[in-house]
Amino acid sequence: MSQHRVAIVTGGARGIGAAIAGALAEDGLAVAVADLDVAAARATADALGAPHRAYAVDVTGEASVTALFDAVEADLGRPSVLITSAGILLFKPDGDRPLVVETDLDHWQRTMTVNATGCFLCCREYARRAPKDDPLGRVVTISSVAAQLGGYRSSAAYIASKAAVIGLTKALGRELAERRITVNSVAPGLIDAPMLRLSLDPADDASAAANIPLNRLGLPADVAAAVRFLVSPAAGYLTGVTIDVNGGYRMQ
C-alpha cells in the first residue's frame, strides 16, 4: 500500500484529466486514474509508472462509484484528494449545439447525469469516508466558463450541469470545512483538449484565440497547474472558490 497522499482523478484517461493526473503524480501523490474507458486509463497510469493505477468507473452509477473507492482504498490507501474531471458535451448530428427549444429530454438528462450527478456521487462517497480532521483533504471539481457566461459553444444542458457543479462545490465546502477539508472548483475556458475539438476545427484556432486577451487557446497543463495548487498545502485557506483558467476570456 502506498505511503503517498492518494488522489482519485475521474475522467483521468485523457485530455484535462490526464494532465491533472500527471501533475499530481509529479507532486508525489499516488494517483488512481479512473475512467469509463479503462483501457485508456490503464495507458495513462502505465505511462506514469508505479504506484499509480487505473480503475474502471461509471460515475453515473452508485455501485460503480462505491466500488471505485473500495478498490482504491484497498490498493493505495484512503484517498485524501478527489478530482472530478469526468464529463460529456453533446451536440446535434450536424455538430451544432442544440438550442433549448431543440433539446430533447434524453440529451438533457444524460448530460446532467454524467456532469452533475456523477460529480455528486463521487463527492458524496468521498465525504462519507473522509475523517473528522484532514488538513490535507482536498476536493477539486471541474466546472466550465460556459457555466458563468451562458456558453457560446455549449448546449444549455452542459451549461446548467456545470453551473450545478459550482453550487455543489460551495455546499460541500461549507459542510467539510469543520473537518479542515477544502472543496474548490476550476472553470476552464477554451482548452485544446478532446472535448473542445468536438466543436472547433484546428483551422479556426486563430479566430477563437482572437477573443481571448492572452491570444491563445489554453492547454490541459494550464488547468492542471490550477488544480495542483488547490491540492497543495499552500491552498489550505481557500474553500468554496472557483478559479477561472481562461486566458482572460471571462474576468470578474
Image (cartoon, grey):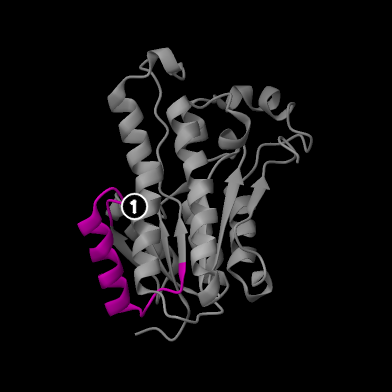
Give the residue drawn at x 33%, y 26%.
107
Give the residue drawn at x 60%, y 51%.
223
From what the image shows, is residue 205 above or below residue 240?
above
Residue located farthest toward the left when viewing the structure as drawn: 63
Give the residue drawn at x 36%, y 58%.
122
| Residue 111 shows in the view | yes
Estimate how packed mark 1 is, as few (under 14), some (14 to 19) or many (20 or more) residues with alpha carbons within 10 Å.
some
Nearer to the camera, 104 or 13 = 104
Label 1, secondary structure: give it.
helix
Nearer to the camera, 180 or 122 = 180
* Number of callouts: 1
Q: Which residue bears the numbered disc 1?
A: 40
Image location of residue 191, percent across then percent down: 59, 40
Image location of residue 154, percent across then percent down: 51, 27
* Left or right side of 107 for 48: right
From what the image shows, is residue 201 above or below residue 58?
above
Image location of residue 57, percent across then percent down: 28, 55
Nearer to the camera, 188 or 134 = 134
For the C terminus, give its image quadrant: top right
Whether 71 is among the magenta residues is yes
Three-letter code for the amino acid on which mark 1 is drawn: Ala
Image location of residue 47, percent across then percent down: 43, 63
Give the residue drawn at x 53%, y 47%.
166
Whether 65 is among the magenta residues is yes
* Left or right side of 206 for 162: left
Nearer to the camera, 5 or 116 = 116
Q: Which residues are magenta?
A: 57-81
| Residue 22 shows in the view | no
Corner quadrant of residue 183: bottom right
* Left or right side of 239 for 19: left
For the N terminus, give its image quadrant: bottom left
Corner quadrant of residue 42: bottom left
